[in-house]
Image (spheres, grey):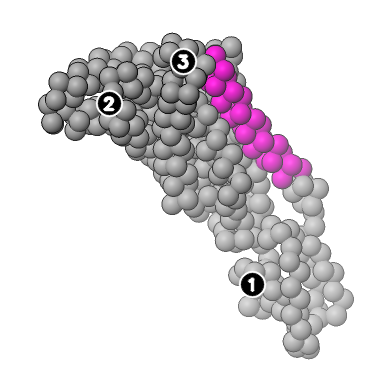
Amino acid sequence: MIAAALLALALAGLWASGAVEALGRWGAAAQKEFQGSMAGAIRALKAGQPAAIWGLIGLCFAYGVVHAAGPGHGKVLIGGYGLGRRVPLVKLSVLALLSSLAQAGGAVLLVYGAIALLGWGGDRVEGLTEEVLAPASYGAIALIGAWLVWRGLRSLLRRAKDGGQGHDHGHAQHGHGHGHVHDHGHDPEHEHDHGHDQGHDHGHDHGGAVCETCGHAHGPTLEQVESAGSLRDMAILIAGIAIRPCTGALFLLVITWRLGLAGAGVAGAFAMGLGTALVTIAVAVMAVTLREGTWSALEGRGAALRIAGPVLELAAGAVVVLVAGQLLMRAL
């Protein structure tokens, strides 16, 4: 938990110091070089060179990796969500992959819809992206970060309110063996005071590990506090990332459309998406590793474990709000 807070502070410090902006400038310069190389590959493809398509696909994949290596909203959102919510690694990795591919698909729909159906030019498509879609995406991501902050604060307040209500059984004797099983259906992190004056063995089923002596769970286990994101959460996250198409994909799709190479443009756009996904999945792995490391370090420490989730959620949400907010202000 302390490591997560320090990481959040370090990320915020890097952002405030301008290091992230320097990385962004490097990424922008590298992407311009890749765009020049892609233009050459497109010309070779138009000239009928059969191997040019594979060169274009490779360049597009590399462009996606370089594009994702710079500061971007997708990594911030995936990383923040992975820190703030206890999502399995496979699920978060799939979310990262789907969001990157959805971003590529959004670029295809935007360019071909605007050019083929509305007759727009490339400049108008890019203007729509930068002036409307980018701010909308950053605003949506900032709202998701605020939602994580709100959830974390709400959980902390709930735990503070219930902090004194630990299990105080007061069992003088065990062994009446009534044999009835109570299935309360509580939130696994909820603790309550039974206050039994008579020592009987209820064998309450809390859905987790129980004490062999009294048959009760005296604190939350890792499994009990696990909380995976829902399909609705995943859809919102994917939409927040996909609504802002990659500029390189727009560049590629517009040029290939004009040259009658639409199929190559679509393939290249999705290759960019896979390159972006490679980096975003790496961010997901780091986020889950940090979170699970924190969980493992706190295993068996009931009080600390109860607040670890909310603290991580609050810190991750704050970082998402900070980064997305600055991106939004820059885009406006």
Decide if residue 170 is on the left or right side of residue 217. right
Disc 2 element? loop
Quadrant in the picture for residue 249: top left
Question: Is residue 154 highlighted in magenta?
Answer: yes
Q: Is residue 1 above or below residue 132?
A: below
Residue 281 pos. (x, y %): 40, 41
Badge 1: few (under 14), some or many (20 or more) residues near its Cα, within 10 Å? some
Quadrant for the N terminus, please.
top right
> Of the residues under marks 3 and 2, which one precedes in the sequence?
3
The image's mark for residue 183 is: none
Closer to the camera in the image, 223 or 42: 42
Quadrant for the C terminus, please.
top right
- Residues at badges 2 and 1 in contact (C-beta under 8 Å)? no
Q: Amino acid at mark 1?
A: Val
The image's mark for residue 120 is: 3
Can the viewer see residue 158? yes
Badge 2: few (under 14), some or many (20 or more) residues near its Cα, within 10 Å? some
Q: Label 2 vs label 1: CA separation?
A: 64 Å
Q: Amino acid at mark 3?
A: Trp
Q: Which residue is mark 2?
A: 261
Q: Which residue is mark 1?
A: 210
Badge 3: few (under 14), some or many (20 or more) residues near its Cα, within 10 Å? some
Disc 1 element? loop
Closer to the camera in the image, 319 or 237: 237
Could you tell me which residue is drawn at 66 percent across and 51 percent down?
A: 306
Decide if residue 120 is on the left or right side of residue 186. left
Could you tell me which residue is drawn at 42 percent across and 29 percent down?
A: 108
Could you tell me which residue is drawn at 46 percent across and 15 percent down?
A: 120
Q: Which residues are magenta?
A: 129-157
Q: Nearer the viewer, mark 2 or mark 1?
A: 2
Disc 3 element? loop
- Residues at badges 1 and 3 in contact (C-beta under 8 Å)? no
